[in-house]
């Protein structure tokens, strides 16, 4: 039986300014989280709670995967709280060269691909955009992998963590790539995501922890006071902090 739940966070009401518009509760522009670290700490609390309910046995093998680079500082306190290894799954959006924000698909460094319904009909253009995105993913993996522990997700409870979900393309293809390694279960864990993506998330993994589903959504960054780009060196530094594995 597939268990799928969405957790809600009760401790952030002091960050929010809500209003009712057309019978719907909408969140105005007051951020929910201070930064990615604080979001990860809040997410870790909820994950630990749900873990105690769903997997009370301490014998469960757990692995935390971050979507770099923004997901790494969110995942760090989660891995620390679970005393679990932290690695990454690198996925890049497939986009038109002149519109990098419009995700037509996504690809992982090891070649798993998902396309949206908006993918171009031109097969040659598809292949070109795919190759460009995969090269970026492979380059990112080459930079980050030296700081990742050697782990095998087969039979493990695998958590995929990001700083939020907007379109969901990279999270979906990351889950697809992870399923190929036959983990026991996949949990999708994010601080914030659009409510309308919840049915899609039911298809990506076995369980989800989403702290907030504000409306309207627009983009992930608006829900953070500090949302600067996470540089590669910062992500590497976070990945190297896994002293609990020693």
Image (tube, rainbow, N blue to C red):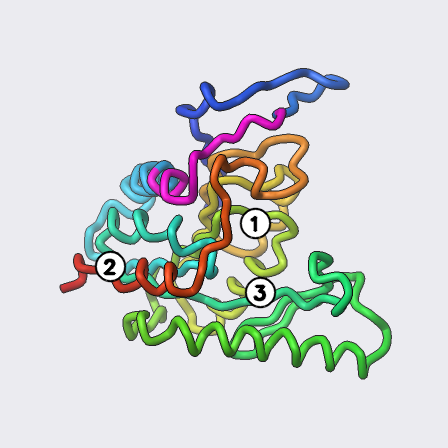
Q: Is residue 100 left or right of residue 165?
A: right
Magenta segment: does it hold 226? Answer: no
Q: Residue at x 48, y 48 (%)?
A: 163
Instruction: Name the residue carrying label 2.
Output: 241
Q: What range of the chain is rendered magenta?
A: 28-41
- Where in the figure is residue 129, as x and y percent of width and height? 72, 76
Identify the mark nearer the N-term, 3 or 1. 3
| Residue at figure coordinates x 32%, y 52% from the top left | 76
Q: How far apart are marks 2 and 3 (CA)?
A: 27 Å
User: What's the mark number on residue 173?
Assistant: 3
Q: Position of residue 181 (x, y in %)?
A: 43, 73
* Nearest to viewer (mark 2 / mark 1): 2
- Per the model, the C-alpha gap separating discs 3 and 1 is 14 Å
Which disc number belongs to residue 202? 1
Nearer the camera: disc 3 or disc 1? 3
> Mark 2 to mark 1: distance in Å?
32 Å
In the picture, measured across the screen, residue 180 lies left or right of residue 72, that is right
Of circles 2 and 3, which is in front?
Answer: 2
Ranked by sequence position, the earlier of labels 2 and 1 is 1
């Amino acid at each position: 039986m597939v268990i799928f739940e969405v957790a809600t966070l009760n401790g952030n009401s002091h960050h929010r300014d809500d209003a009712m518009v057309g019978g719907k509760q909408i969140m105005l522009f007051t951020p929910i989280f201070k930064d990615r670290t604080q979001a990860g700490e809040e997410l870790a609390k909820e994950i630990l709670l749900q873990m105690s309910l769903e997997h009370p046995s301490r014998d469960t093998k757990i692995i935390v995967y971050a979507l770099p680079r923004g997901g790494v500082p969110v995942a760090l306190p989660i891995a620390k709280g679970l005393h679990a290894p932290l690695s990454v799954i690198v996925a890049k959006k497939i986009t038109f060269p002149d519109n990098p924000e419009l995700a037509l698909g996504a690809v992982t460094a090891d070649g798993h691909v998902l396309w949206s319904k908006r993918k171009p009909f031109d097969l040659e253009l598809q292949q070109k955009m795919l190759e460009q995105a995969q090269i970026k993913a492979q380059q990112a993996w080459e930079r980050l992998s030296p700081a990742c522990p050697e782990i095998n997700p087969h039979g493990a409870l695998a958590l995929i963590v990001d700083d939020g979900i907007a379109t969901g393309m990279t999270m979906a293809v990351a889950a697809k790539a992870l399923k190929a390694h036959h983990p026991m279960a996949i949990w999708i864990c994010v601080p914030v995501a659009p409510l309308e993506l919840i049915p899609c998330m039911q298809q990506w993994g076995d369980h989800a922890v989403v702290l907030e589903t504000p409306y309207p959504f627009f983009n992930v960054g608006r829900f953070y006071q500090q949302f600067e780009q996470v540089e590669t060196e910062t992500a590497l530094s976070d990945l190297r902090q896994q002293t609990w594995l020693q």
